[in-house]
Amino acid sequence: MSVNVPAPRRHARWPIFIAPVLLLIVAVAWSAFWFYAASQVDVVTDAWRAKEAKAGRVYDCGRRSVAGFPFRLEVRCDDVSVQLISQTADRTANATPITAKLGEILVIAQVYDPKLVIAEFSAPATISDPGGAASYVANWSNGRSSVVGLPGVPQRASIVFEDPTLDRVDRSARQALAGAKHVELHGRQVEGAPPDRPVVEAVLEIASGRILEQHPLLATPFEADIHTTVSGLKDLSPRPWPERFRMIQAAGGHLDIVQSRVQQGEVIAVATGTLGLSPSGSLDGELQMTVAGLEKIVPALGIDKMLEQGVPQATLDRVAPGVKSQDINKLMGALDRALPGLGNVVRQNATIGVAAGLNAIGKEAVLEGRKARTFPLRFADGAVYFGPFKVAQIPPLF
């Protein structure tokens, strides 16, 4: 008896090619998409530069290249220059712009999330005076920033510098002006604010900061953590800074110091309050300050040494604007003539007297477990008053 054995079934082989073919199609489509996105870098960048140029900030790139295939767009810009026009309150007609030059900026964006842009800056940066000579040099070990919302209106932005320094270059000599261990600034639009009245929240953090040749109190390293909000803006489109400040003043906007803490050695100061702008563009308002270690401020300002050695007017102008050095010296001389040695006694006890006067300001408080004083720091048309004493004059912002 014969048995019929069925012939083996032949399986179609074409399904095994489906996955590779689909993968190839996806790869080709993705490559096409990446190269299209790369081709749009110049278009988007030029449109952004045009908007910034109208706001008085002219950016130029000596050489630009695009890389990062397949998932990123890496835009590298060499020989960067930034020309700042009408960005200060200088009212002089046809004022010469300030020019800053930077070696390289690397901008990175993910192809699938192009609104998040991360940038890295290569040091140093040179800032030229109006005459064209390099007068300032900024350095840092690491500089980076991130922006969310481009190419439209940014929703939030951050910038961070590690070990930043700023030096003034005078011919072949270089003099330090400022420096810090770490500086970072964060800003974002506050949710819920009307589109035609945006509110911006900003946080500034400084570690081991120093500012030289300004106020003696700022020459000693300090830590700062400042949280603010700004209102009075009509929009966040690019504008020259004086124009933006003028807009805030006209709308009755203000800067709210939500929280502020500054520490310098044993001195700790916290402050809250509101600052606005006067019609002339100067700061107006009041901050409520609480300071622990207030007695340390007097020697930090150098008042005791100035009284002992005589006060150079240039130094006194920085510490106590409006007071003439010859008035203090004449007073001490008159005391010595009336009773020899009396002037020296006053000089030796000046710090105690001034400290007692400062402690009489405000009221007692406790700050971080330490005795402190709470008092107002007033701003009147740019003049800064520490209690009844004028301690500084801030130039107008527009």
Image (cartoon, grey):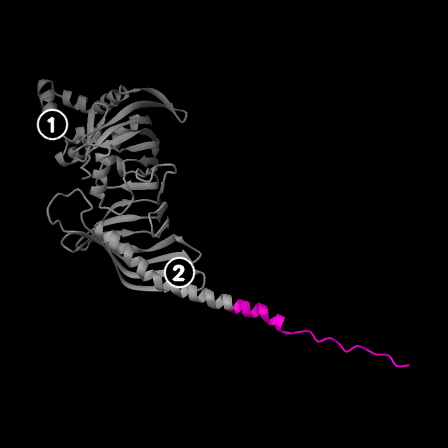
Give me the disc on residue 329.
1
Residue, far bottom: 2
Q: Is residue 351 above or below residue 164?
A: above
Q: Nearer the viewer, residue 385 or 36?
A: 36
Residue depth check, mark 2 versus mark 1: number of the one nearer the observer: 2
Q: From the top left corner, tell me how far across and down residue 300 is, in percent.
A: 26, 32
Mark earlier in primary sequence (2, 1): 2
Q: Visible in this render: residue 103? A: no
Q: Position of residue 141 (x, y in %)?
A: 35, 52
* Image quadrant containing the N terminus: bottom right
Q: Position of residue 128 (x, y in %)?
A: 19, 53
Q: Quadrant of the C terminus?
A: top left
Horizontal side of residue 90 vs 294, given as left or right: left
Q: Residue at x 39, y 52 (%)?
A: 115
Residue range of the region highlighted in magenta in the rendering: 1-24
Kind of residue sitting beneath label 2 = Leu
Q: Is residue 324 above or below residue 110?
A: above
Kind of residue at badge 1: Asn
- Tell me if mark 2 has few (under 14), some (14-19) or many (20+) residues whose alpha carbon lies within 10 angstroms of its own: many
Quadrant in which residue 20 is drawn: bottom right
Closer to the camera in the image, 279 or 43: 43
Say above or below: 277 vs 158: above
Residue at 54 percent across and 67 percent down: it is 22
Q: CA distance from mark 2 to mark 1?
A: 67 Å
Name the quadrant containing residue 32.
bottom left
User: What residue is shown with label 2?
Assistant: 73
330 sits to left or right of 222: left
Q: Residues within 10 Å of mark 1 (few under 14, many from 20)?
A: some
- Measured as percent of width and height from the top left, residue 381 is found at 18, 30
Image-quadrant location for residue 376: top left
> Which residue is at a point 10% across and 26% down the rendered structure image?
327
Secondary-structure class at tag 1: helix
